[in-house]
Image: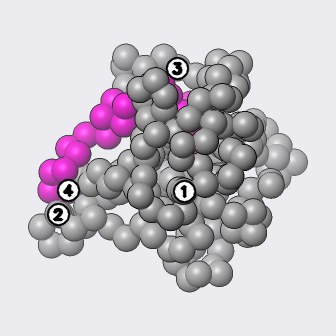
Amino acid sequence: MDSVPKLTVESYEQLVTSLRGRTVLTVDYFVLMTGDEGTTPDGWDYGTWHEPTMGIELTMDPGTTYSATWNHTFGHYGLELYRAPMSDFVFNIGKPGGSARITVADHPSWAGILASPIESCHILWSDPEQGSAIQIPEALQLGTATGQVWIAAGRSADYAPNGLFHLCTDDVLVAFDSGTATRAGLKT
């Protein structure tokens, strides 16, 4: 991560704004490897939401790679976007005890996002009235003419289909509909 520039509020806002008009071509998740040998990808598909624990790599036209991962640049775990591959943030990809790279571009939940230009892109900042003196980037919301996605720093509390979520954790959570995003505590 030494080669990745440190984000500021201004540079983060500019980076996210620069996504408008770009088209997501491929999506890869990076999940932890579990099991006795550390070679089994952890579960990540829970219907209207996914939990790619370590992060997401988005390849956009014309071949630019972005990574959405949790980090603590703003004082606590938040969702951060970088113009860099996930290999700059995650080590031991594909090795026991590391992270598994899972291509999800063919997953039906991503169908409304892929191959359509991004029309809206926003950082969802934490509400300073909820106890934190600083604002944390809880999530990114990306929208196209045919779909929307929220990529957040967070995780499920219990993995039940209608369960609760925790935001600003060292995990990545993806929601594909406004009901799930609202249930997770994200502003929609």
Residue 10 in picture, x, y percent from top left = 71, 18
Residue 123 as seen in the image, left or right of residue 129: left
Residue 136 vertical position relative to residue 110 in the rendered view, above or below = above
Q: Earlier in the sequence, mark 1 or mark 2?
A: 2
- The residue at which mark 1 appears reads as 111
What's the residue type where badge 3 is placed? Lys
Numbered label attached to residue 175: none
The Cα atoms of the two marked residues, 1 and 2, are separated by: 29 Å
The Cα atoms of the two marked residues, 2 and 3, are separated by: 32 Å
**Element type where label 3 sits in the image:** loop
Camera-near label (3 vs 1) is: 1
Mark 4 surroundings: few (<14), some (14-19) or many (≥20) residues within 10 A: some
Q: Earlier in the sequence, mark 4 or mark 1?
A: 4
Question: In front here: 110 or 37?
Answer: 110
Numbered label attached to residue 6: 3
What's the residue type where badge 4 is placed? Gly
Q: Specify the segment rendered in magenta.
A: 73-97
Residue 67 in picture, x, y percent from top left = 46, 36
The Cα atoms of the two marked residues, 3 and 1, are separated by: 32 Å
Numbered label attached to residue 39: 2
Name, please, the residue furthest toward the right: 129
Quadrant occupied by the N terminus: top left
Q: Earlier in the sequence, mark 3 or mark 4?
A: 3
* Residues marked 2 and 3 touching at CB (< 8 Å): no
Mark 1 surroundings: few (<14), some (14-19) or many (≥20) residues within 10 A: some
Q: Earlier in the sequence, mark 2 or mark 3?
A: 3
- Residue 5 visible at all: yes
At x 83%, y 43%, the residue is: 128
- Residue 136 visible at all: no
Camera-near label (2 vs 4) is: 2
